[in-house]
Amino acid sequence: MGITEKILCSSTHEYLLDNENGTFTIGLTDYAVEQLGDIVFLELPEVGSEYKKGESFAAIESVKAASEIYMPISGKILEINEPLVETPEELNQDVYENGWLVKVEATADAATEMNDLMEYEDYKESVH
């Protein structure tokens, strides 16, 4: 089973992967990265920071645009993808396996907060 069969996507182009241990991996969808073009800068939050669903938690810049990245669920940052901050262009190669942004522990009822997220196939249809 591919990773895109396991993720949920937000209308603001973030993906959420349930790690099935109470933690979630968050990143940007392949569509979002395609739209941004060549990534030149990525700013990620501090480990231990807490964010509510819908809050901006990171910033990304490409040769085309600068964008905020939003939390698809409320959570506490457990881990950030530190190597990606140093080489943000890697995001253009692989958004799912090595291009994740943060890992979080849910701080609210994740099941309820995930109600408005789409399965990948539905997300792909909504953006094309």
Image: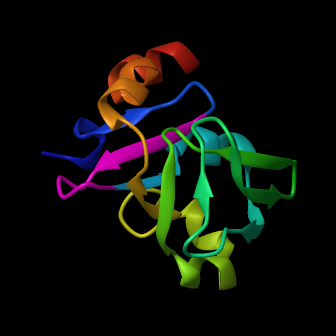
Q: Is residue 1 above or below residue 78?
A: above
When asked about the image quadrant of residue 82, the answer is bottom right
User: 90 left or right of 59?
Assistant: left
Q: Is residue 43 magenta?
A: no
Q: How is the rendered protein coloured?
A: rainbow
Q: Residue furthest front?
A: 108
Residue 100 seen in the current view = no
Q: Residue at the spot x=86%, y=58% of the render?
A: 63
When asked about the image quadrant of residue 123, the answer is top left
Q: Is residue 12 above or below residue 30?
A: above
**Residue 105: image location, x then y, percent:** 38, 58
Q: Residue at the spot x=57%, y=64% of the render?
A: 91
**Residue 47: image location, x then y, percent:** 56, 75
**Residue 117: image location, x then y, percent:** 43, 25
Quadrant in which the N terminus appears: top left
User: Residues in magenta?
Assistant: 13-23
Comparing 71 with 17, the one in front is 71
Q: Residue furthest left?
A: 1
Q: Residue at the spot x=58%, y=35% of the render?
A: 13
Quadrant in which the C terminus appears: top right
**Residue 112: image location, x then y, percent:** 36, 24
Q: Is residue 81 above or below residue 97?
A: below
